Every structure is written in structure tokens, then in C-alpha cells.
Image (cartoon, grey):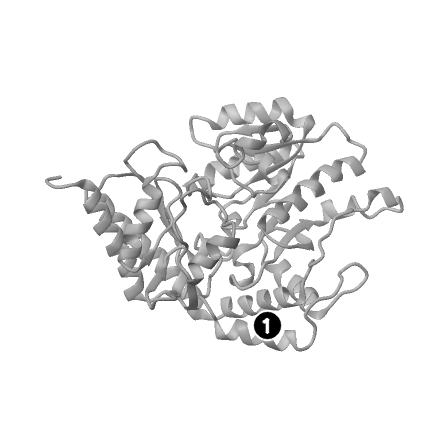
Amino acid sequence: MSLAERDQQVIWHPFTQQKNRPLPIPIVKGKDSLLFTEDGKTYIDAISSWWVTLHGHANSYIAEKIYQQALQLEQVIFAGFTHEPAVRLAERLLPLLPGNFTRIFYSDNGSTSTEVALKMSIQYWWNKGETKRRKILAFKNAYHGDTFGAMSVSDRSVFTLAFHDLLFEVIFIDTPTKDTIDGIKAIIHQHSTEIAAFIYEPLVQGAGGMKMYDAYLMNELLNTVKLTDIICIADEVMTGFGRTAKFFASEYMHNKPDIICLSKGLTGGTMALGVTACTNRIYQAYMDDDKYKTFFHGHSFTANPLACTAALASLDLFEKETCLQQIEWISESNKKFSAELEAGWYPIKDLRFLGTILAFEIIQGADGYLNSISSIFTQLAMREGVYLRPLGNSVYIMPPYCITEDELECIYSCIKKLLTQLKGPGS
């Protein structure tokens, strides 16, 4: 029995319809931008394996650091104990974050980092005796994770449909445009005394289809939110660590968050780790003799030494000039490729790019995650040696920073070839 057949007997894969599902593709090795299959095929990982693998697969520098740490300390309870990797990572991260952050709270992944942020915000007001401020403000089309708090502040969509009556009440607003900004401000002023926090994906809504919005108007919106004393939570799980051409997407706005959520690229994609950082304002609400004002939250693998070590190694790689040059080069390449697509009369719409992210919608069927063009496009791309995984009819690329010029050109050529095929004969 092959590895794929053995898998199908025992594994339940994420975001995958179970009945009549095709056999998964066994990956036996990864190196830099490439994935190698059991039968010897090679694929360019054009989406960084769900947006996490920033420096490429099997990065030898990160692997060596993890190995050295594993020989010294692999895990220890983080209530009452501490260790060098966790402290050093916090010391290095805090000065890099976009705002005046003073504390790092560790968790396991992106979803838990947003859960921490939500609980931290709601209890902040509870600790201060303002118990009416319990509602959360969030964007329509948002996605913040798959745990219940994260689902609650995500758009009511196919991802959350089975649980709608169990999710807590959220005030949803549009992303800001010239037409919507005044109405959004009015909603905020109307509900300001009952809103605990505003959670947002800065400038790019990831799983919602890589939707992008304007930095200037977002800054204006954040200004209104801050004037009403609402806590601002930036979910930079996907947008952090160079994805938008700046280290964090929040750097595009003058108004900075009070809490920031990080994961995915935090460890260069090698280990699961989540970070929720907060300003001193938030932290001081928990500095009290009253034990009931303790933040009763934690995870068994909080601040895992191996994961913190991987994150430190990833930061080392970021400090190299070559990494920043690669991010700049990918960003400029995306800009040029976008111009090619616009000039090609392909069956696409809403072409957009920001930094290393480029996205568009295929004009075929209804917009949305359940559009079957996703699986078709993935299969066709893999025949060309490229791994793409559209979000419904939203096609995007988000390559590792180590990608070569030939590999990136191969991705671009593959996309143009497939879009030409979709145009049909005589188009």
C-alpha cells in the first residue's frame, strides 16, 4: 500500500471534502522553494505552504539552531519558569514591532494568538470595572482563525456556517473606501461605549480572498477608533515579516495597534508558535493585588524553546541584506507581472498586489471559496510543476523569499498559460 493510500485510511485533512477526495500527494523532501514527491516529481511552492515558509524549506541555518537547542532544552513549563530563547526572542521582537509594545504573550499558532488578544481586550475592560464594553468590532470578509473566538470575529461564511448560533455578537463594518468611511465612523461613534476592541487584518484580508484596501483610509479609520478609546488589535499573522514589503503591514499607517498577533512566518515556517504583544496600557490593567484580575490563559507548549529558537534564527536571516533585497525584488517583479496581466486581456478581474503578494479573481462562475475552479486550477498548475492553491476563484501567489528568478518566472508563465487556456479557442 502506498503512502497516499495509507494516509487515506487514517488521516482527516484540513479544508478538504472527505467523500470521494483524491489521494493526497506524498511529499518526501523540501528544499528552498521546491517540494519533492515520492514518485520523483518537483513542484515550486508558490504559496509558501500556507504562507509560512519565508526562507524556504529545510533551511540549514534554522535547522542547525533547532538541533543545538534540542540537545540543551526542548520543553519546559512556562508558568514559574523561563528560558533564554523565550526572553531573547521577546527582547528582539519588541523593538521591531510597529508601535510602543512592552510585553510578549506566547501561544501556539495564529488562531490562538487572536484568541489571546480578544480575551486580553475584554478582560482589560472587566479589570477596569467597565463591564459594558464587551463587543468586538471587525471587518466583513475577515478571517482570524478556526477556534471559537477567532471564528466569532471572522465573517459569517462557509468557514463558520455550522456554528453561527454559537458565535458571540460582533459589530461588522466594511473595509474603508471613500464611499464607506463616513458611514463606518458613524457606526463606531454609535456603539463606542460598548465596544471593547477592533480586530483587523491590516491592508490584506488573507483567507477571505487576498482582498486589499487603502492604507490612507485605514489610518483615518484607526484615528476614529482610537479617539473613542477602543483597543486596536492588528492580526498580522499573515501580513507580518515582510509579506507586504514592509516588515509589518501596520507600518503603512501612522496610527498603530495596541495589540498585535503574530504566527505563520514568525519561525520561518519551521515550527508552530504564536505571539500576542501588547502595549503597557493593556499590561497595567493586570498589575493588581486582586488575584481575580490575573490573565488566566496558557498552553502546554507556551514559549516552547525549540519554536523560540527557530524564530530567533529566522530573525537572523532577516537581518541579512540579501533577504531584504529578495523581498524588494519579488515586490518589483509582481508589479511588472501585474502590468503584463493587465495588458493581456485575460479572463480576470480585480488584479491587485502588495509587496510579495499578488492576487486576482478568475471570471468564471460565482465568486467565493466554493468555486470549483480552485481545484481545476491547482491540478493544471501542478502539471506545469507549480503548486498554487486558489481561494475559490481568487488566485494568488506568495512565494518564499529565497525563490530564484527562474522559479518566479516559471510561476508567472504557468499562470499566463492557464489563463490563456481558460480564455478558450478564438478568444
Local crowd size for mark 1, using a 10 Å CA cut-off: few (<14), some (14–19), many (≥20) = many
Q: Amino acid under label 1?
A: Ile
Residue at x 72% of width, y 57% of height: 300
Residue at x 76% of width, y 62% of height: 77
* Whole-percent x, y for residue 127 in the image: 80, 38
* Whole-percent x, y for residue 375 in the image: 35, 45
Q: Is residue 193 left or right of residue 52?
A: right
Residue at x 79% of width, y 64% of height: 81
For residue 51, say whether it is visible.
no
Residue 74 or residue 274, whichever sits in front = 74
Q: Is residue 419 left or right of residue 191?
A: left
Report the residue marked by disc 1: 66
Residue at x 78% of width, y 47% of height: 296
* Whole-percent x, y for residue 53 in the image: 47, 61
Local secondary structure at mark 1:
helix
- Residue lying furthest right: 289
User: The N terminus appears in which quarter of the rendering?
Assistant: bottom left
Q: Is residue 96 above or below residue 205?
A: below
- Residue lying furthest left: 426
Residue 148 or residue 36, whichever sits in front = 36
For residue 303, say whether it is visible.
yes
Query: Which picture quadrant has residue 198?
Result: top right
Q: Is residue 18 left or right of residue 39?
A: right
